[in-house]
């Protein structure tokens, strides 16, 4: 949907629903949350928003300055307003085995996934080793760009044995929710984190500069019986994630 169609007042502007600039502020925030206005995108000029919404320019200006105060919009002298591209700061515990969808929901954000690849494939040597597969087994792969409130945060490439995920096409938003429903949710995982500089393609997907710092994360997760359920290689935005671990004095 275009931003002009999204701002057409019939579907959101209502009498008695509070001040008009607050209603417009809410509508533009929704456009950002739903990805209609992605990070870095320009907002239509003030007079255009006024024309689309039938609101006065003063009302439009008030709504935009509220968005700017909140940091959702950046106003640039002479070139207009843009959706902020500043990464949200996400503190992620390293001791809980949670899913991306759950992590974002806990922060009041809506997780979305854009498919990069999914299907059944011949396993690579690494997948065979980690997942314990034979050369004639297939492997279920899903690769997704994960975003929160429309802002891309991670690229995740998950590989699973076919008996755990027989049909990768049925994953909607949450892989773990689907595994849970099948009684196959991982209960334990190991994770390896290393630093990388993002190449052109990955940087483009994550909406950061080429060469920006990223975190490469490998997660191997296990079922209650010790079997490997998932082997996921991810690239996380280095400017957004802070991983936090609790340490205790070792007693030998
Ligand atoms: C997390 C996991 C990933 C898992 C995904 C499931 C890391 C580094 N990765 O992002 O291994 O596949 O959650 O999320 O923590 P979903 O249930 O929302 O699809």
Image (cartoon, rainbow, N blue to C red):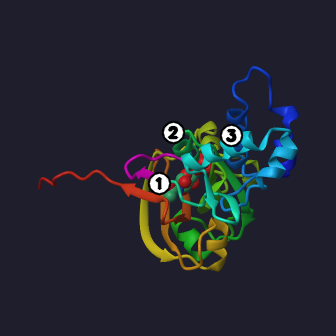
Q: Over which residues does the magenta segment extend?
A: 89-99
Of badges 3 and 2, nearer the viewer stands 3
Q: Which is more N-terminal, label 1 or label 2?
A: 1
User: Distance of mark 3 from mark 1, alpha carbons?
Assistant: 23 Å
- Considering the whole magenta stretch, tell me its main secondary structure: loop
Relative to 156, 197 lies left or right: left
Expressed as whole percent of the image width and height from the top left, the position of residue 116 reads 72, 64
Relative to 246, 106 lies left or right: right
For residue 25, the mark is: 3
Q: Decide which of 129, 156 is in the foreground and name it.
A: 156
For residue 89, the mark is: 1
Q: Quadrant of the C terminus?
A: bottom left
Q: Which is more N-terminal, label 2 or label 3?
A: 3
Of badges 2 and 1, nearer the viewer stands 1
Expressed as whole percent of the image width and height from the top left, the position of residue 227 reads 50, 53
Kindly indicate the quadrant of the structure image that contains residue 56.
top right
- 3 and 1 marks in contact (CB < 8 Å): no
**Mark 1 residue CB less than 8 A from any atom of ligand 1:** no
User: Distance of mark 2 from mark 1, alpha carbons?
Assistant: 14 Å
In the structure shown, which secondary structural element does the residue marked by tag 2 occupy? helix
Within 10 Å of disc 2 (Cα), the crowding (few <14, some 14-19, many 20+) is few
Of badges 3 and 1, nearer the viewer stands 3
Residue 228 visible in this rendered orientation of the protein: no
Residue 59 visible in this rendered orientation of the protein: yes
- Pointer 2: what residue? 106
In the structure shown, which secondary structural element does the residue marked by tag 1 occupy? loop
Q: Which is more N-terminal, label 1 or label 3?
A: 3
């Amino acid at each position: 949907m275009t931003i002009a169609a999204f701002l057409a007042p019939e579907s959101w502007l209502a009498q008695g629903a509070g001040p008009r600039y607050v209603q417009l502020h809410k509508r533009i925030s929704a456009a950002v949350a739903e990805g209609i206005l992605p990070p870095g995108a320009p907002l239509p000029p003030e007079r255009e928003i006024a024309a689309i919404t039938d609101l006065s320019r003063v009302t439009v200006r008030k709504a935009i300055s509220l968005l700017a105060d909140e940091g959702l919009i950046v106003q640039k002298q002479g070139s207009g307003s843009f959706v902020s591209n500043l990464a949200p700061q996400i503190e992620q515990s390293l001791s809980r085995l949670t899913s991306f969808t759950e992590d974002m929901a806990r922060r009041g954000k809506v997780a979305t996934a854009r498919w990069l690849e999914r299907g059944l494939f011949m396993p690579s040597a690494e997948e065979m080793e980690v997942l314990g597969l034979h050369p004639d087994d297939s492997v279920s792969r899903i690769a997704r760009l994960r975003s929160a409130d429309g802002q891309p945060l991670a690229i995740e490439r998950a590989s699973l044995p076919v008996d755990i995920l027989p049909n990768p096409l049925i994953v909607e938003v949450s892989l773990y929710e689907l595994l849970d429903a099948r009684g196959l949710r991982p209960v334990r995982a190991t994770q390896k984190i290393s630093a990388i500089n993002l190449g052109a393609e990955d940087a483009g997907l994550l909406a950061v500069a080429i060469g920006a710092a990223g975190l490469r994360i490998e997660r191997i997760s296990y079922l209650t019986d010790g079997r490997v359920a998932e082997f996921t290689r991810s690239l996380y935005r280095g400017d957004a994630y802070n991983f936090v671990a609790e340490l205790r004095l070792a007693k030998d």
